[in-house]
Image (tube, rainbow, N blue to C red):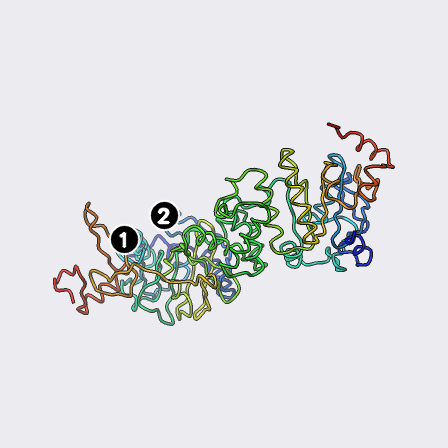
Amino acid sequence: MTLMQNAITAAPLLSVQGLTKRYGPRIGCADVGFDLYPGEVLGIVGESGSGKSTLLSCLAGHQRPDQGRILFDGADVLAFSEAERRRLLRGDWAYVHQNPRDGLRMGVSAGGNVGERLMAVGARNYAAIRDSATDWLGRVEIAADRIDDRPSAFSGGMQQRLQIARNLVTGPRLVFMDEPTGGLDVSVQARLLDLLRGLVRDLGLSVVIVTHDLAVVRLLADRLMVMKSGRVVETGLTDQVLDDPQHAYTQLLVSSVLQV
Amino acid sequence: MTDQAYNFAYLDEQTKRMIRRALLKALAIPGYQVPFASREMPMPYGWGTGGVQVTAACLTPDDRLKVIDQGADDTTNAVSIRRFFQRTAGVATTERTTDATVIQTRHRIPEQPLAEGQILVYQVPIPEPLRFLEPRETETRKMHELEEYGLMHVKLYEDIARHGEIATAYAYPVRVEGRYVMDPSPIPKFDNPKLAGNPAIQLFGAGREARIYALPPYSDVVSLDFEDHPFTASKADHACDLCGSGSSYLDEVITDDRGTRMFVCSDTDFCAARQAQGHCGRLSPQGDAP
């Protein structure tokens, strides 16, 4: 429980207040606020259309929210210039897409995919770039002899692991994940979750993970936020929310999970 | 021979003015791609419509024009563009690099060092060096704006990973004045060092893509590379079979169907001048090799 103790003493890494995004008269997400502490994993769950993806894209800077504040390390991200924002996106932040094809360059080899972020922050030594690419492929359990293969020659699970390696190679502090296990079969999902859990622990990453799969957040998340119709209806520790849901919608969500 | 039905150098004065404004802006921001209202020219895209428009905007009646295609003065593209300006502008033409004031080139820089006062006009097929890595124009513009050029090195990384060395042999990307990454048009990378510190004005015109960019005289131009795989200007490891030059860029010509080949200077003016001075190579008509 050292992580939790750290979380209590440290200042929040990401602090969100009153975040609202409207699509015309409709609400994408409304009045969302939370604090994320270093080393903490926050799960956001809810059904399709509940605003969790809108919230994530606002947080990651893909969309501009209509109201609210996002503080990263005490700095107001929404006030950043585009250059600063993009520097954040390829340095301290990382974004894992649901579909690895959105996050990878399919025409570039696995090594090039992992090395891209390094080169984007100024690495200019081929041998060093290749060494850290090999190292990271190993950490996500991709054989070193696949380093010159293109992602199109990889299976879906390998592509997703490659995307994770590509994102973590620059040592980000905050990772956004959008349904990282979506579209994978259950055994591959289980391995990926295991891998993610290990990486998050070892590197002390802070993660915001969006999913509709309660099993994923049960394994990964320290804290949970349940969303419905663009609003947060319940928050709390993961086990507490899943074992003793208070809001009627959370109770419905938990009871809808199929028991095998 | 001047065809009086056309304005001087084919284009009307307002069009030339528009192109000159783009040229001035391009010279003011070295390596930056300036959009311009590219006109249809009486030749197909890919034959030098961009270069021809830039040349037309630069020409004055006193100029002496040289046109080369892959270094040669006597190939179809060079001959037809030279004749085009003879007819529409009535300017003098030459094949000698030193005599020319304006040189339009396709894919080569002349071997003879250029001098102050000369203008070198390049024909550019694809001006965007990031194009094959990032297909979105909005995104490549943003990358230029924010100097996000890591992706260019991904291309070089892929070269080394696949071929063991940087295999890009032409259109080798350069960084201009520490700012913009620029496609030097498909010149061989052998010519890349001549881009830097060149006393001539270098203008690049892309007709289909409607972009103009430029290098003012004595610009700082650096070819991109890795610390442990530095840039090298490569050429065929031979001497010219006609003039014996060991330092010029060579074309490989297959001379029969049994694989016999010869290497000749791609710059015909340079080769002819050397032959006139008495230099000879392995296959010189004079017979005796040095």
Q: Residues within 10 Å of mark 1 (few under 14, many from 20)?
A: few
Residue B283 position (above or below residue A236): below
Mark 2 or 1, nearer chain start:
2
The CA span between labels 2 and 1 is 16 Å
Q: Nearer the viewer, mark 2 or mark 1?
A: 1
Residue A159 position (above or below residue B184): above
Question: Which residue is depicted at the point 50% across and 49% down?
Answer: B133
Which of the image's four quarters has the C terminus of chain A? top right
Residue at disc 1, secondary structure: loop
Q: Which residue is mark 2?
A: B43
Question: Which residue is depicted at the point 70% across and 58% down?
Answer: A80
Q: Amino acid at mark 2?
A: Met
The answer to whether one can see residue B226 in this image is yes
Between A68 and B18, the one lying in front of the other is A68
Callout 1: residue from which chain? B
Residue at disc 2, secondary structure: loop
Rendering quarter of residue A171: bottom right
Q: Which residue is mark 1?
A: B75
Indicate the position of residue B147 as horizontal and vertical percent values: 56, 60
Indicate the position of residue A138 as horizontal and vertical percent values: 56, 49
Indicate the position of residue B200 as horizontal and vertical percent values: 39, 68
Q: Amino acid at mark 1?
A: Thr
Position of residue A235 in the picture relative to residue B212 (left or right): right
